Image (spheres, grey):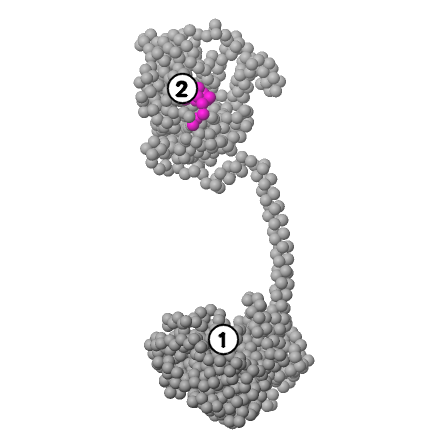
Amino acid sequence: MQAPDEGAAPEGIDDATAEVEGLLLSCMDAEDVDAALDDVCSQHPQHASKLRAVWARMQGLGLSPKATSDDSPTRIGPFRIVDKLGEGGMGVVYVCEQDHPRRTVAVKVVRPELLHFEGKRARFEREIEATARLAHPGIVPILEVGHDGGAPWYSMEFVRGASLAQAIKSLSGTHASRLTGESLLDAIHDCMREEDRATIDFERCRTLPIFTGSWCDAILSIVTQVTEAIDHAHAHGILHRDIKPSNIMVTPDGRALLVDFGLARASKSTGDQTLTRSTSSLGSLPYMPPEVLRGHSADARADVYGIGVTLYEALTLQHAFLDSTAESTRSRVLDGRSARIRTINPTVPWDLDTVCRVAMAPEHGRRYRDIRALREDLGRLRARLPILARRPGALIRLRRWQQRHPGFTVFAATTICILITAGFVLYAIERRGRIAEGKLRARAERSLYISQLSQALSAIAMDNFNQARQVLDSTDRSQREFMWKHFKLRTDSEVQRWDFGERGMTRHAISPDQHRIVVASSPKTLRIMSLAIDERRASIDTSVDPIELRGDAHFISISQDSKTAIVSPYDGSWVDVFDIPTKKRVTTFEYSDQSGFMAQFLADDTSFVSMSTDGRCVVRDRDSGETLREWQALPVDRHVSKELVLDASRSLLACVSERQPVCIYDVKGERIQSIDVPGVNVDSMTFASGGKELVVGSYEIRSSRMYVNRFLVADGSRVKDYDVLSTPSAVAVHPGGQWLVIIAATIQVNDYENARRLRTLNGPTQPTEIARFDSRGFLWTTSNDGALRRWSLTEPAYETTMPGNANSITALGLARNGSTIVSADKDGTVVIGNMDARMRKVLDVTDSRAIAIATDPTSDSSTARVVFRDGTVSTLDLIEAEETSRSTITPDIAIATWCRDALLTVHGDGRLRAFEPSGATELTCELDLGTPITRITASGDRVAIGTDDRVVLLTVDVTAPARGASLLRIDRTWPYDSGITALAFDSKAARLAIATEAFQLAIRDIVSDEMVFDAETTNSRFSALAFMPGDEYLAAANWSSQIWMFDPRAGQPLGHFFLGTMPLCLVTSPDGRFLATGNINRHVHFAWFERRP
């Protein structure tokens, strides 16, 4: 239902007349009409004459608002006036008696002073017409219509009750939360005339449902009835447009009736004429919807709004928007600024609060779409069903707040913008500072890390592995890279490790058949475990259940048949016997004389020998524990027994106590020899050379001197002295007899015959007292840190070699899988080795120097090609380790490389040639640099060439030869003051590493053409370069047998280590496990960064 233009004047009334009408009405509302008229005339001189003329005529006709009660009429048409009910802006309502038919009615007549204005008369007549068109129980009906002395009137049913506004006003002194339905009836009673009360049975009314419930239920009932009446009016095309509590009558029997259709109009949808037009605002200001106040037309949602405001007032006994002035009231209406209902009356249900809020929403589109939708939700409320309306969200409430406070909003928005801008500026400044600070911190942290690596390297060089380990462990975890990993392996270089129990005494023994290992650990625990040893690894079944001992074990011995083990403690007070296959304890022998020290099986496996604290050697039966023989092996009244060892055949034994010579006996007790050792305290002994020699480790406390000496058993003479770095706690001789291992703070591997120290291994952080070799030549140790370790004396964890080449290795290649390596030497020998299987195969391809090796980067890594100086190009199958094809190209090749789909060779005449990869066909390559080429490398479609004074970057165009053009095109040139010794691309061919004869090492960014790293290095030329996986670090090998690691970001080297003898070529594994060098000593050397599997 769309409203017509409310600003248009009624038909037949021009704008000037309408303006005069409005000005005159404003004067009539004043206390002093004459004074008000004079003020208006002075303000509107153009209307002054007309205003005074109209006012004079009204006074002449007795239509002045100052009429006294004596002038009040006694009759209106056929009605006798009984009382005056009320007076509105347009009319007066009287209680009248009608004779025929005899009844009491209410008569409404136009106020006499308004009869002069045709607009008011017309509006009154339209009210009559609008009301007459409606017939609904909730709308007071019109009975008769007429004129009296020119004044129109109409009679209607006299409603005995009170308006909702009167009821609310009578309850204004009571808090809304305390009201009940009965309170509404009491309010109606108080507002009625005395004579009308007498006609009502109020006691009966109190039993009606509307008055027996809560206040909210009573108001819901009233408002629901009103919505039914309005729905009826809307259905007949009538909009009320002035819904408020004073236009709602409530009777004692609970009926609600809608009155005063003075502002009603018909909707355009009915096709009827507009019922009301006015130049003034319609309705009462506090109840008018915001869109009408803004001059827009009213529709059905205007009545929805009136219901919402009325419901608010009835629930809270306070008006939603009424303020002290019209302007402030208007502002509150436009902003929708009202107190929350539940803040005033907490008893109002949330759903009822929501319905009210949606109905009186200031945004036209957020209200109920029509009165029927509101009526439906009211019905759901009364039926205790979920409502359809939803409360306004946070954004809507924020927008309303902004509309209510436009000035503050502009100020806040400006302030926020300024703060945000300032925040961004400060953030940018702070971020720039943080970035700079972060760079400085990162540089400082990197410098600290590099200095720590240098300290660790110095400690390793001095065999101070504990200090090196402490330094490495103190480094920042985020800084650690390949060099740290390699140094860590050097300080903890066992090849395998198993941890048992807590830190404390740990001992072990390996069965002669190599199938069992017995480990005793703290606290009081023994494990008998299966052992499997192959060429590379040892496997132990650690899942077995531990066996509880009487105390910590000091020594374990296993019989020659590998079926029985005996365990004894340090104090010799007991010996336990175990059956190895069943892992069960067979028996326990206890010795009060503590004669079970270092119990060990003899060769017959049925007896064992041990010592007592007073120096006696005792041989006992394994099964019964019976003493078979004993003898005083060491002098009485001396220090306690220290060591007891047997030779490999278990026929000789050596024993010693503190400050005494070493005594050697056969197992029958016959003394063989007595040996004086240089140290007064012996910590370790072992027989060697089939029992002919004895190695003894000793020390002198007073002089802090340490000794390891080799003696002849036959005559006790000292054969050889070995240098030792710290107190020897154990010694062991390799089964092959070529190495003597001295266990101290480190593991020293010495040449047995000439006593030269070969290498040093490190790992234990606590004393190691047991060292034994297995059948594969690996050393096993247990120490007091609770760990069992396995060591390789030939290939420590940090470094291994692969022999096989006949001469200096001049070319090296690594398959993409990182496990197959190909080396070729200056005599034409090719070795294919598998890193995981540790197998290699030697191929004699030619007798010419190998120049370059390339693995196929596009396939499954099963193919490699080798080019030799004599022009031979050999294709290898890496899986079968054999040559599959061979071709020949122009000989006298000095250097070569493979690039994208091409083999590039530089010959003795300095000419650069190109061939298809297998060498079968030569490709067009027209390139003349005018200077000898010394180095060449390629990656993808980029080629770098080094000469005596420059580096030339080339681009490969594989389609060019088909067009008769050159395969290579010069991209750019970088001049250098000296010759180029090594070149290397990173994995993406985005950076190029360059080494010169002047010991300069540089890295260039090819994309930006900037130097990202440039440094003067050691006084040794770099022979090979390779980027590590990830391209963050550069490995460089020099002629001094050193491998340097550089960090381009830090602008300095991380450190170096020695690897082999003068490396000539260098490769890095794709997974970062190792790097390998081909050396002049005919071996491929591997530096490991991770422990090998």
Residue 137 in the figure: left or right of residue 640 = left
Q: Are marks 1 and 2 in contact (CB under 8 Å)?
A: no
Tell me where residue 272 appears, x and y as whole percent. Answer: 38, 26
Can residue 1013 be seen in the rendering of this structure?
no
- Density class for disc 1 (Cα within 10 Å; few <14, some 14-19, many ≥20) is many
> Which amino acid type is shown beneath numbered disc 2?
Ala
Residue 458 in the figure: left or right of residue 99 = right
Residue 731 in the figure: left or right of residue 266 = right
Q: Which residue is mark 1?
A: 783
Q: Earlier in the sequence, mark 1 or mark 2?
A: 2
* Residue 626 sits in quarter: bottom left
Tell me where residue 653 appears, x and y as whole percent. Answer: 46, 87
When the figure is inspected, residue 269 is found, relative to residue 140, above or below; the finding is below
- Residue appearing at x 45%, y 88% in the figure: 669
Q: Which residue is mark 2?
A: 187
- Residue appearing at x 51%, y 39% in the figure: 399
Tell me where residue 752 appears, x and y as whole percent. Answer: 53, 89
Check disc 2 and report its element: helix, strand or loop.
helix
Residue 227 in magenta stretch = no
